[in-house]
Image (spheres, rainbow, N blue to C red):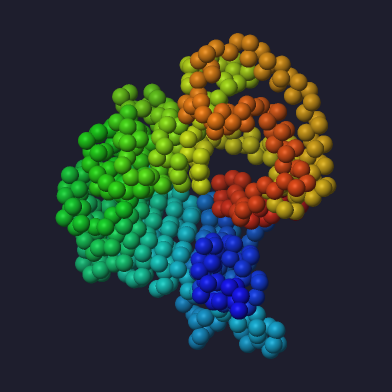
């Protein structure tokens, strides 16, 4: 017997593989490997209203047996062409006598085998993610037939929302993760029949381990009662709470309540919506709630020299740093906004990423992106006559970055120009390298032909860059986070053409070499503000044209 025939050894080997690798490289090998891996496989149903062409009914028809349901409906047109969420969730309550079976009687032997394999992968619905913008009524939210099996629920509302949170907690007794986000001046309103009963409607004990609320409008006393019945809570994030004269929140009282509960918190965030002045002592107390936390969420305008120093000297090796942009403070990136003593610009965050070695394993980042801070060679003046104050650029030191989430704020005219460019100027050959179907010789040749048309632009750019080199000063050579060691010198050498069209040409020619493999692990991609999908589908969606008529 060979080692690959020992089930225990195979299970150990498979435990080191992610679900995507299991599905692509392990499951198709043989029946034994499939049976050993099936408990780690799950099916996800995903649909976004911005995917073209895509109809929700086809996606929801495959919902029975799926463990994850992710719906992105961040458009006002949801009411007439969005998915029937109510009907889909109600259909799960009317499953066949054998809940693992989602198929009608099948007469053919080969179809029976396929149905048997499908049943082995069937799961009850555990995770639901719903992003919407349409103004649903309270009745719509309260009539959602949430499955009893639900363990994770995430709802993001682009407009105001009134929701009966106690009803969710009662209907879903197995719920371990509840994330509710609302992007609106009215916020996330806790309202409904069970909410009106106060703490009497809450169960004696909840399984919640993660509770994240953005812009909640809720009484502090009710939240304290909720925390009293969640002894297993590991993550608590109350982001920009609505605090007013009628609904006043006191940090000192809430802090003392948390201490009395002794919750096993591993991640904590607390901030008030209208409090855009920084209290250094309060920030220290908030950070001290989880002194050994490896994950932190911090509001962007709470960034002060003291906070920056505290993060740099944080005793625990940080794995996640999430910089939150307050939804109603898009102007907060301006240094002149609000309290002049606070630093609202991106500069300190940028320097933190360039200097703090603890962030080398940074997993998630949300921050304002300023191209000036990345202009290592001071090339921006080559293309603009606008005078600006001197800025020292830098290189991020988190070289093992796994996930980077940038939220770019673009005004309406810029968005329209971007759409016009994609539809008029951009050819499919410029983007279809994202999927395997665009990597054949025909498409490679078209990209090479495209690059050949850049000759005059490249010559003009080279002349401008030569002039820049003549006027370069010692200050222009200073780069944060790029000390003179062998690794950094090699990195700076590789970045010598950063910001030039020549760099784009070099990368394109390198990518189109016959044996070059790029983005080998790319599973999903999103070119826009919608849910990611397989590269092939994303390319089709980008260049989809509606039929005439």
Q: Position of residue 119 (x, y in %)?
A: 57, 79
Image quadrant occupied by the N terminus:
bottom right
* Front residue of this view, candidates 526 and 455: 455
483 left or right, relative to 518: left
When asked about the image quadrant of residue 287, the answer is top left
Residue 118 visible in this rendered orientation of the protein: no
Residue at x 59%, y 45% (from the top left corner): 528
In the image, residue 439 above or below residue 281: below
Q: Position of residue 365 (x, y in %)?
A: 45, 42
Identity of the residue furthest to the top in this view: 471
* Front residue of this view, candidates 74 and 503: 503
In the image, residue 288 above or below residue 262: above
259 left or right, relative to 438: left
Residue at x 25%, y 33% (from the top left corner): 280
Q: Position of residue 283 (x, y in %)?
A: 26, 38
230 left or right, relative to 45: left
Identity of the residue furthest to the front in this view: 1
Residue at x 65%, y 27% (from the top left corner): 497
Residue at x 69%, y 33% (from the top left corner): 504
* Total numbered labels placed on residues in the image: 0
Residue 462 visible in this rendered orientation of the protein: yes
When asked about the image quadrant of residue 332, the answer is top left
């Amino acid at each position: 017997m060979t080692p690959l025939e020992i089930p225990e050894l195979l299970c150990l080997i498979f435990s080191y593989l992610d679900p995507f690798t299991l599905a692509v490289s392990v499951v198709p090998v043989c029946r034994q490997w499939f049976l050993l891996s099936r408990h780690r496989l799950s099916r996800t149903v995903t649909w976004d209203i911005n995917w073209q062409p895509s109809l929700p009914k086809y996606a929801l028809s495959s919902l029975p047996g799926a463990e994850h349901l992710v719906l992105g409906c961040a458009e006002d047109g949801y009411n007439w062409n969005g998915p029937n969420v109510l009907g889909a969730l109600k259909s799960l309550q009317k499953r066949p006598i054998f809940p693992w079976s989602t198929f009608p009687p099948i007469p053919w032997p080969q179809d029976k085998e396929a149905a048997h394999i499908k049943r082995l992968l069937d799961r009850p619905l555990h995770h639901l993610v719903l992003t919407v913008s349409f103004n649903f009524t309270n009745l719509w939210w309260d009539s959602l037939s949430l499955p009893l099996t639900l363990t994770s629920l995430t709802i993001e509302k682009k407009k105001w929302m009134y929701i009966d949170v106690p009803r969710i907690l009662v209907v879903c007794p197995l719920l371990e993760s509840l994330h509710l986000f609302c992007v609106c001046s009215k916020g996330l309103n806790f309202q409904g029949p069970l909410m009106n009963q106060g703490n009497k409607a809450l169960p004696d004990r909840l399984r919640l381990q993660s509770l994240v609320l953005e812009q909640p409008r809720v009484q502090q006393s009710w939240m304290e009662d909720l925390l009293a019945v969640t002894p297993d809570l590991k993550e608590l994030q109350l982001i920009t709470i609505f605090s007013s004269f009628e609904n006043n929140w006191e940090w000192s009282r809430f802090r003392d309540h948390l201490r009395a509960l002794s919750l096993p918190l591993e991640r904590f965030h607390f901030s008030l919506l209208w409090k855009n002045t920084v209290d250094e002592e309060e920030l220290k107390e908030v950070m001290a709630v989880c002194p050994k936390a490896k994950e932190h969420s911090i509001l962007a305008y709470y960034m002060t020299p003291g906070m920056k120093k505290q993060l740099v000297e944080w005793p625990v090796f940080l794995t996640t740093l999430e910089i939150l942009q307050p939804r109603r403070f898009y102007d907060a990136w301006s240094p002149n906004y609000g309290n002049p003593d606070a630093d609202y610009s991106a500069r300190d965050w940028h320097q933190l990423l360039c200097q703090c070695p603890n962030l080398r394993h940074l997993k998630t980042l949300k921050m304002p992106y300023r191209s000036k801070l990345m202009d290592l060679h001071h090339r921006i003046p080559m293309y603009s006559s606008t005078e600006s104050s001197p800025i020292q650029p830098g290189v991020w030191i988190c070289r093992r970055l796994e996930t980077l989430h940038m939220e770019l704020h673009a005004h309406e005219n810029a968005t329209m120009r971007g759409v016009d460019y994609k539809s008029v100027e951009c050819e499919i050959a410029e983007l279809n390298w994202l999927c395997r179907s665009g990597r054949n010789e025909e498409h490679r040749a078209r990209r090479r032909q495209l690059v050949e048309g850049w000759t005059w632009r490249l010559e003009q750019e080279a002349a401008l860059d030569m002039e820049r080199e003549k006027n370069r000063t010692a200050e222009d050579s200073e780069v944060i986070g790029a000390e003179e060691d062998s690794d950094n010198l090699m990195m700076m050498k590789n970045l010598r053409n950063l910001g030039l069209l020549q760099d784009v040409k070099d990368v394109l020619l390198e990518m189109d070499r016959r044996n070059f493999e790029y983005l080998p692990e790319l599973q999903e991609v999103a070119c826009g503000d919608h849910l990611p999908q397989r590269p092939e589908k994303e390319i089709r969606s980008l260049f989809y044209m509606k039929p005439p008529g």
